[in-house]
Amino acid sequence: MSDLAQLPETGTGRLHIDLVRRLAAEVLGTGLLIVAVVGSGIMASRLSPHDIGLELFENAAATAAALIGLILIFGAVSGAHFNPVVTLVDRAFGTTTNSETALYVSAQIIGACLGTMLANLMFELPVVEWSTTTRSSGALWLSEVVATVTLLLIIHGCVRTGRANIVAFAVGIWIGGAYWFTSSTSFANPAVTIARTLSNTFAGIKPSSAPMFVVMQLIGAVIAYGFIRLFYPSTVAADAQHTESTGSITSASSSTV
């Protein structure tokens, strides 16, 4: 399990830098992620008015691409969590401490809210404009559970089988796809959910709808934790995992030289 503490999405980065720098990376990374989500939603609605399908495609593509880039940038710095459920599951597996978890989650929420404000300003909208888009139904809530479970399985499925170097691509592509096969468009992130209440645009969610989304995401995290323990028990092939992970990291490092 110790190897997981330095790999992307399951730890706090293999550069082993101080906490302040890691928190700054989480603030900036989560902020830029929500800039991509909200900003591309605004742009899509302006470029393709009255065509919801095309708007969703543009929003999903921009978000997926930005997420890949951000994980590649910050994965070695902070672990590139950008998501409280990712951090909480990491804490459950013991790869982060209680204090790190609380600070990471706070940084993610702050970064996400600042990112929404920045996106609003970039498109000449009010800094804060509460969303009026109601997203409240059993189908949407179920979708958030599914979206969160599968996101966490993608992350741990890659990292725990020695493929940490493809996490960025796997997560980005999966989120891009999940926009389309979940009725909620796969928020799967409490920080992003909170931040999206601050923009009355394509990607927004009404403040009264947000709490149940967050609850469903937390339930999804608990379910995902159980599945991860089931499919990737910590006592199975630990030595092999270490060897494979080290090889993957070395290969990835060599390819960037």
Image: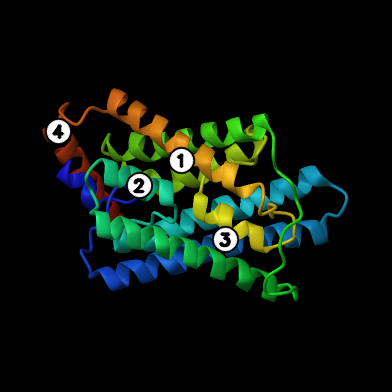
Horizontal side of 174 relative to 125 (left or right) equals: left
From the top left corner, tell me how far across and down residue 107 is, in percent: 41, 65
In the image, 64 versus 149, the foreground residue is 149
Q: Which circle's residue, 2 or 3, is located before the other in the chain? A: 3
Residue 15 occupies which quadrant of the picture? bottom left
Q: Label for residue 88? A: 2
Vertical placement of 200 versus 150: above or below?
below
Which comes before the other along the chain, label 1 or label 4? 1
Tell me, yes or no, if residue 22 can be seen here: yes
Residue 187 visible to the viewer: no
Between discs 4 and 3, the one toward the N terminus: 3
Mark 1 closeness class: few <14, some 14–19, many ≥20 residues within 10 Å: many
Q: Which mark is residue 111?
A: none
Mark 4 = which residue? 238
Q: Is residue 81 left or right of residue 212?
A: left
Mark on residue 218? 1
Q: Amino acid at mark 2?
A: Leu
Residue 146 in picture, x, y percent from top left: 53, 31
Q: Secondary structure at mark 2?
A: helix
Q: Which residue is mark 3?
A: 34
How far apart, in angstroms, are the residues tagged by discs 4 and 3? Answer: 36 Å
| Type of the residue with mark 1 | Leu
Label located before the other in sequence (4 or 2): 2
Q: CA distance from mark 1 to mark 2?
A: 9 Å
Neighbours of disc 3 within 10 Å: few (<14), some (14-19), many (20+) = many
Decide: few, some or many residues near mark 2? Use Cα within 10 Å; few <14, some 14-19, many ≥20.
many
